[in-house]
Image (spheres, rainbow, N blue to C red):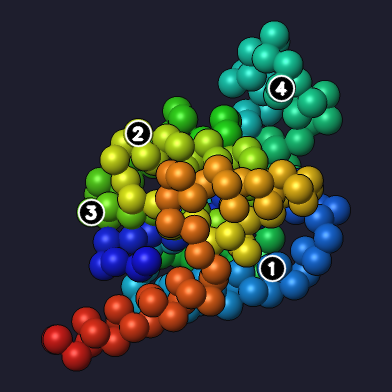
Amino acid sequence: MAPKASVLVVLDVQYGAIAGFPNADDYIRRLETTIKIAREAHVPIIYAKLGFSPGFSEVPADKESMVWQKELFTFKVNDPTAQVHPAVAPAETDHVINRTRLSAFAHTNLAITLRGLRVDEIVPAGLKTSEAVLATVMQAGDWDYRVTVLKDFCMDRDKEMHNLMVNRVLPRHATVCTQEEWVEDLLASSKGRDVSM
């Protein structure tokens, strides 16, 4: 589940996205711990977050699925809604990518960053399961990356939709496991590398 060439991709853990989610504080605490473990194990971390220009020039006027962002003026690059929660904020060694679409690959430099890091597996975690997570998983498969989804680190406002995604849809395209399982495998892999060195 956690090969040498994996990267943790954190999706949309921003004030404007996580606000109103039940158990958000517990989620942030658990994610903070996992990110710390990943850094200590030298797993690269990429934050793929929504970030629009002040005039929302990236959003076509007739794109109905995104018009709410223009109407609410949310997720502008320097707006508070676009800021990553401080408990899990990027470190200097992490990578930050601004997105204007659901998939972390769409119109971003994610693919180039992954090639530069020489990784072949992505591990997405974040919001929402049926949107950014699903879109990123699907496109990662098209780019021939292996994918492991941390199902308890993905959230959706629709609980039934989340369950459908992690139990039926995502397992067709990725390995789906819990955070605990991934961390256990990650630590075991790290220990094995230390012994071999």
Residue 24 image-quadrant placement = bottom right
Amino acid type for the residue under numbered disc 1: Ile
Q: Nearer the viewer, residue 168 or 98?
A: 168
Q: Which residue is mark 4?
A: 65
Circles 2 and 4, Cβ within 8 Å, touching? The answer is no
Residue ID at (81%, 55%)? 21
Neighbour tally class for label 4: few under 14, some 14-19, many 20 plus, Cα within 10 Å: few
- Residue 180 visible to an observer of this rendering: yes
Numbered badge on residue 142: 2
Distance from label 2 to label 4 (Cα)? 23 Å
Amino acid type for the residue under numbered disc 3: Arg
**Relative to 138, is 133 above or below?**
below
Numbered badge on residue 18: none
Neighbour tally class for label 2: few under 14, some 14-19, many 20 plus, Cα within 10 Å: few
Q: Earlier in the sequence, mark 3 or mark 2?
A: 3
Neighbour tally class for label 1: few under 14, some 14-19, many 20 plus, Cα within 10 Å: some
**Relative to 109, is 126 above or below?**
below
Q: Earlier in the sequence, mark 4 or mark 1?
A: 1
- Residue 14 visible to an observer of this rendering: no
Q: Left or right? Give the position of 171 relative to 159.
A: left
Q: Which residue is mark 1?
A: 28
- Expressed as whole percent of the image width and height from the top left, the position of residue 134 reads 55, 41
Q: Which residue is mark 3?
A: 118
